Image (spheres, helix red, strand yellow):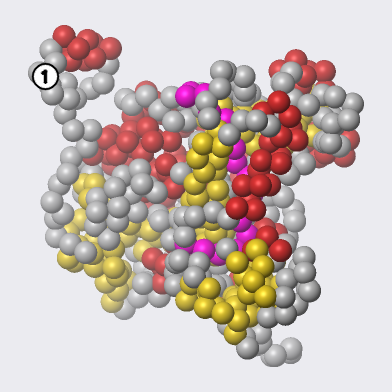
Amino acid sequence: MMIPCPYCGDRDVSEFRYGGDATKQRPQHGTGDLKTWHDYYFLFDNPKGPHTEYWQHVLGCRRWFKLARNTATNEIGGVVS
Amino acid sequence: MSKHYSALALARHALDPDLPWPRAWEKPTPKSSYDVVIVGGGGHGLATAYYLAKNHGITNVAVIERNYIGSGNVGRNTTLIRSNYMMGGNTAFFEHSLKLWEGLSHDLNFNCMVSQRGQIVLAVSPVQMDVFARRGNIMRLNGIDAELLDPGEVRKLLPYLDWSKDARWPIHGAIMQPRAGTVRHDAVAWGYARAASALGVHIIENCEVTGFVIDDGKVSGVETSQGRINAGKVGIAVAGHTSHVAKMAGLRLPIESHILQAFVTEPIKPIVDHVVSWGAELFYLSQSDKGGLVFGAHIDGFNTYTQRGQFNRIQTVAECAVSLMPFISRLRLLRHWGGIQDMTPDGSPFICRTEVKNLYLNGGWCYQGFKATPASGWTFSHTIANDQEHELVRDFGLDRFEKGRELDEFGLGNWTYKQ
């Protein structure tokens, strides 16, 4: 699988580190009860289909970015700004 | 026509080729209603149905499988069984599983080819030997077999490893579980299916569950590609796709689906007599009855439902194999394949009730689904029959994260596989 780094271009997946679901909203500091933080940290939609996620080009420019990928096919939808 | 498998039956069929072997399991038309419906006809689902009938006398059961029996993870693993765990919630559960494996072929009247060839985990540093000594002591205190081996003892058992002075990872010893080994995984699926069917369980293949019928927080059936099937209770056992299926019941779970690859080389003469695991990297191997070396390794590292692995994992596995056993450097990989597994924050599974009444969850098996199959079925069937978790799975609840009772076998913290 090739990942399009926004700075370096298409590079092999082995150069990247996966950072998880990028659509989660972190609760504001000092707000929310235990359940809010539990759900934020532990629960995932884990969809079979379109997914927006974080990747880091850890063996390259080390940039973090958001990527659209289909988890059912690994088809890359491109970088999400 | 003989339904019981035996040497006599084999002889009778050999002498009379016109005598047909009966179907191993029936192909019934789904009824409109069952006492219990199990979603997922993998090893865990079939074992659950079998023990529901055998241990709890509940035979009005349907196992609904989207594909055919044996098509999923039960046929995509590296066939390992072991119980070298040390956390309180794990030890008794996995040891119970190993004990069930030991008697499974007789219990099911199906040769599962259980081979207790022993698992040897190699230490590549003195510190790792200390860690293994601790693990071994905890195992023995729990009545599980474990032996610490010094380098000389390991060399006697595994003379084919790289014992040269310039080995990249010199071997400092090992921990061995003699009762660990391998099982023919297809036979497990077929054996449980046949034994469950003989007790009256309906196994419905090529039927996809497309939804749950839920009223007032209580499940009363499933929608399938062959129509609605009513059920008193419903169990989900679809690890790999647990999030996908549970979402239809409105559940959001602490699970991500990841791919784990396995590999087999071209066949060679018998050389690897044990299951050998490496302390330097997550890598292990055994030799199949056909002669191929079977390699297992780490997950690819990002969530996916595709059963296609990435090339960089193949490269890592080849590097591990050659580093451990340089003489196989010219051996060719014959096949590699991927299975989708539920990864959980602490690497431990779920067998529990859910927030939907009469809906029960079995999933989150991470790397350890196959070896758990018998105990998983044993305890999940108890949980469904009694609407109460079996004592062996009291730590496998969905609520363990909010209660601070994570079952972190390796003491590494949450989501370590993503780091």
Work out whether B19 lies above or below B306: above
User: What is the span of residues highlighted in magenta in the rendered image?
Assistant: B289-305
Please give the name of the residue rendered at 56% of the width and 72% of the height, measured from the top-left corner: A43
Q: Nearer the viewer, residue A40 or A20?
A: A20
- Residue B295 within the segment the image draws in magenta: yes
- Which type of secondary structure does the marked residue at label 1 adopt? loop
Subunit of label 1: B
Left or right: B191 as drawn, with respect to B254? left
Image-quadrant location for residue B1: top left
Q: Residues within 10 Å of mark 1 (few under 14, many from 20)?
A: few
The answer to whether residue B308 of the structure is visible from this angle is: yes
Work out whether A39 lies above or below B208: below
Left or right: B284 as drawn, with respect to B156? left
Give x and y (percent) for residue B377.
Answer: 41, 44
Give x and y (percent) for residue B226.
Answer: 17, 62
- Residue B367 within the segment the image draws in magenta: no
Image-quadrant location for residue B107: top left
The answer to whether residue B348 of the structure is visible from this angle is: no
Image-quadrant location for residue B214: bottom left
Left or right: B253 as drawn, with respect to B17? right
Work out whether B308 lies above or below B296: below
Hey, which residue is sitting farthest left in the picture? B18
Give x and y (percent) for residue B318.
Answer: 66, 40
Q: Nearer the viewer, residue B171 or B328?
A: B328
The number of numbered discs placed on residues in the rendered structure image is: 1
Q: Nearer the viewer, residue B288 or A40?
A: B288
Please give the name of the residue rendered at 66% of the width and 84% of the height, measured from the top-left corner: A26
Give x and y (percent) for residue B240.
Answer: 47, 57
- Find disc 1 in the rendering and name its residue: B19
Work out whether B163 lies above or below A6: above
